[in-house]
Image (cartoon, grey):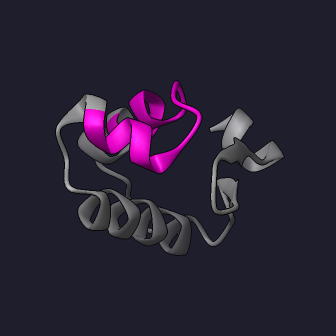
Amino acid sequence: MEDISFDELALFVRLSKFRSLTEASSKLNIPLATLSRKLKNLEHRLNTRLVERNSHQFVLTKSGKST
């Protein structure tokens, strides 16, 4: 596993407080595509899914809850 930066972890913690990427994007003032890419990159680096996504919302996985 690669080292994860504080900024990446802080973004995930902030993201986990919202019910959807769209809501998080709006409230955090981060473009949706950027937010989605950062989350996918973090999941790839940790080699685990942190959230289960669907078209309307996302839910933290067990790995996401323990992160």
Rendered position, 9 above or below 4: above
Q: Quadrant of the C terminus?
A: top right
Residue 44: percent from left, percent from top? 52, 75
Q: Is residue 12 found inside the magenta-colored segment of the image?
A: yes
Residue placed furthest toward the front: 56
Asked if residue 9 lies left or right of residue 55, the reply is left
Rendered position, 4 above or below 10: below
Q: Is residue 44 found inside the magenta-colored segment of the image?
A: no
Magenta stretch: give its range: 11-26
- Where residue 36 sits, quadrant-wise, is bottom left
Asked if residue 12 lies left or right of residue 20, the reply is left
At horizontal 47% and vertical 70% (from top left) the residue drawn is 40
In the foreground, 17 or 25: 25
At horizontal 56% and vertical 64% (from top left) the residue drawn is 46
In the foreground, 63 or 25: 25
Residue 55: percent from left, percent from top? 64, 62
The mark total stands at 0
- Where residue 23 sits, quadrant-wise, is top left
* SS majority, magenta: helix
Residue 26: percent from left, percent from top? 27, 38
Residue 1: percent from left, percent from top? 53, 68
Asked if residue 19 lies left or right of residue 14, the reply is right
Residue placed furthest toward the right: 62
At horizontal 46% and vertical 30% (from top left) the residue drawn is 13
In the foreground, 36 or 2: 36
